[in-house]
Image (spheres, rainbow, N blue to C red):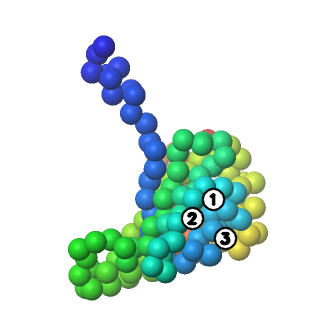
Amino acid sequence: MTDTEARNGITILASFLPHTDRDATVGFWQDALGFEVRNDVGYGGMHWLTIGSATQPDTAIVFYPPQSTPDLSDEERAVISGMMARGAFGMITLVATDLEAEFARIKAAGAEVVQEPTVQQWGERDCVFRDPSGNMVRINQA
């Protein structure tokens, strides 16, 4: 087996994004985007949510409460909170087969639009929303 063949056995299991409000996170990711909530774990007033696409059962996004990150100072937590509020902390890129239809559906669900469908200078057509925690959600045209 070559090194390349051995490395091809690695796939993405989960990505992590911070969240500040369990109900708002579920509302956006489940109700507006159509993802499924696979796990909701509460501990000490905090929630960790595992959310994913029904068409990708082996890949998920784990939403974690940023205050659960160990060894952060109060100052560091304040910086993270400020970055999240500005949409400068978490980001994910998704892909859709019909960008216009998905954009219209998500916008109608009340999501915060950052950028309407646009052809970027590098040729990609995409749009951008912000989730309730400030994470930037870019959706590319397949």
Quadrant position of residue 32: bottom right
The residue positioned 39% from the left and 69% from the top of the image is: 89
Could you give the CA–CA distance between mark 3 and mark 2, rounded to whole angstroms?
13 Å
Question: Which label belongs to residue 40?
Answer: 2
Q: Position of residue 58 (x, y in %)?
A: 54, 41
Quickly name the residue at label 3: 27
Q: Position of residue 34 (x, y in %)?
A: 70, 57
Front disc: 3 or 2: 2
Image quadrant holding the N terminus, namely: top left
Contact between labelled residues 2 and 1, with CB atoms less than 8 Å apart:
yes
Q: Is residue 30 visible?
A: yes
Q: Position of residue 53 (x, y in %)?
A: 63, 49
Quickly name the residue at label 1: 37
Image quadrant holding the C terminus, namely: top right
Quadrant position of residue 126: bottom right
Q: Is residue 4 left or right of residue 59?
A: left
Helix, strand or loop for disc 1: strand
Labels 1 and 3: the sequence-earlier one: 3
Query: What kind of residue is marked 1?
Result: Val
The residue positioned 23% from the left and 74% from the top of the image is: 71
Q: Nearer the viewer, residue 99 or 7?
A: 7
Helix, strand or loop for disc 2: strand
Q: Is residue 75 left or right of residue 85?
A: left
Sort mark 3 into few (<14), some (14-19) or many (20+) by Cα contacts within 10 Å: some
Q: Position of residue 62 (x, y in %)?
A: 48, 59
The residue positioned 46% from the left and 50% from the top of the image is: 14
Query: What kind of residue is marked 3?
Result: Gly
